[in-house]
Amino acid sequence: MKLVKTASGKTRIKMNRQEWSDMGKKAGWLKKADFVDQLDQLTDSDLQRLMNRYSYIKTKEDAIKLLINAEDKAVRTGRLHPGCSLQEVMNVLAPRKKINITPEDIQPRKKINITPEDIQ
């Protein structure tokens, strides 16, 4: 990277492609591009989860806008790491409902002895 004086007297930064690429990796630009590529994998069930949670989402494009904005905000606030997956963002926006099952809820099957006399 070099600082170069222009003919008008202004100072400009001159860098080669590798330096620009390294700077982008450090800033997380490539990770952001990976996330945007994952948006093609948005399934109908993911879309339905978002529609159920947010009433203003009517189309897939609305959902994609929401996901991009949510990913930006979650990374800035530290809830998610840069380069997080689509499912991680989905779990922050519209978590799946967890069903808590305790051992008491699961009862073993009882054996019933039926004799031929019981059938008649």
Image: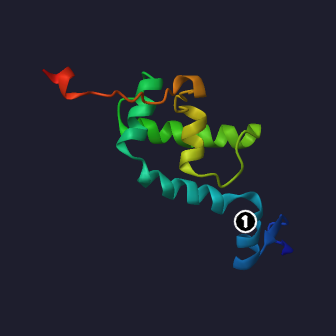
Q: Residue furthest left?
A: 120
Q: Secondary structure at mark 1?
A: helix
**Rendered-image quadrant of the C terminus:** top left
Query: In the rendered image of this protein, does residue 77 appear above or below residue 54?
Result: below
Residue 17 seen from this side:
yes
Residue 73 in the figure: left or right of residue 38: right
Front position in the image: 118 or 33? 118
| Residue 93, picture quadrant | top right
Give residue 40's position: percent from left, percent from top: 42, 54
Determine crowd level at label 1: few under 14, some 14-19, many 20+ residues with C-alpha closer than 10 A.
few
Residue 100 in the figure: left or right of residue 55: right
Give residue 101's position: percent from left, percent from top: 56, 27
| Residue 116, picture quadrant | top left
Residue drawn at (62%, 55%) of the image: 32
Residue 16 seen from this side:
no
Residue 50 in the figure: left or right of residue 78: left
Q: How is the image coloured?
A: rainbow
Front position in the image: 100 or 51? 100
**Rendered-image quadrant of the N terminus:** bottom right
Front position in the image: 66 or 90? 90
Q: Amino acid at mark 1?
A: Lys
Residue drawn at (44%, 37%) of the image: 63
Residue 36 in the figure: left or right of residue 25: left
Residue holding disc 1:
25
Give residue 107's position: percent from left, percent from top: 49, 26
